[in-house]
Amino acid sequence: MARERRTVSILLLEDDDHLGHVGDVVNVKPGYARNYLIPSGRACAASKDAMQRIERAKKRADQRRTERAARVAAVGAALEGLSLTFEERASEEGHLFGSVSAARIVEELSARDVLIEEKQIELEAPLRELGIFNVPVRLDADTVSELRIWVVEV
């Protein structure tokens, strides 16, 4: 016997990468709505009154989306064709004594006036070998840019 899945309809007050945009009515589990989305001000119960109030929030959200898209495009343009070189000590087999982590990549990028957060760099694990690596950088939910990393021996 299959168990029926209960959901509640809520109205989003902020953009959410996983749920939707401001003004969207989405169905979520009751606990998620009650314990997180509504108390944090990210959503409210879907009603006619709330739908009327959301129009101003939609305009502000559209403006923020436009500004964010411009920032993403600027960072994407700065990353295009950019490569970073890290000089590290390594064993004879090419294994590094240290590693090149996302934090070090962010530091090097910030020295070049490219500001991104560490969580945007999608490294599965720190780089621990000599070589050339293409590291994906998630600029936005839909935009991924590649950064070329050279790890060479000192």
Image (cartoon, rainbow, N blue to C red):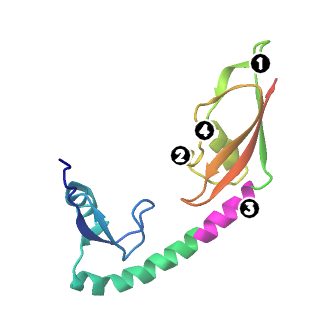
Q: Give the alpha-carbon distance from disc 1 to disc 2, as whole Å.
A: 27 Å
- Along the horizontal axis of the image, is 52 left or right of 129? left
- The residue wearing badge 1 is 94
At x 58%, y 31%, the residue is 125
Query: For mark 3, does the 10 Å Cα neighbourhood hold few (<14), some (14 to 19), or many (20 or more) residues?
Result: few
Whether the residues at callouts 1 and 2 have beta carbons within 8 Å, the answer is no
The three-letter code of the residue at mark 4 reads Leu
Asked whether residue 116 is drawn in magenta, I would say no
Q: Give the alpha-carbon distance from disc 3 to disc 2, as whole Å.
A: 19 Å
The three-letter code of the residue at mark 2 reads Lys
Query: For mark 4, does the 10 Å Cα neighbourhood hold few (<14), some (14 to 19), or many (20 or more) residues?
Result: some
Q: Give the alpha-carbon distance from disc 1 to disc 3, as whole Å.
A: 32 Å
Q: Nearer the viewer, mark 4 or mark 3?
A: 4
* Disc 1 element: loop
The image's mark for residue 123 is: 4
Magenta stretch, residue numbers: 69-79
Give whichever of discs 3 and 2 has the lower sequence position.
Answer: 3
At x 53%, y 46%, the residue is 119
Give whichever of discs 4 and 1 has the lower sequence position.
Answer: 1
- The residue wearing badge 3 is 77
Q: Nearer the viewer, mark 4 or mark 2?
A: 4
Whether the residues at callouts 1 and 3 have beta carbons within 8 Å, the answer is no
Q: Give the alpha-carbon distance from disc 4 to disc 3, as whole Å.
A: 21 Å
Give whichever of discs 1 and 3 has the lower sequence position.
Answer: 3
The three-letter code of the residue at mark 1 reads Gly
Depth order, front residue of 134/83: 134
- The residue wearing badge 2 is 119
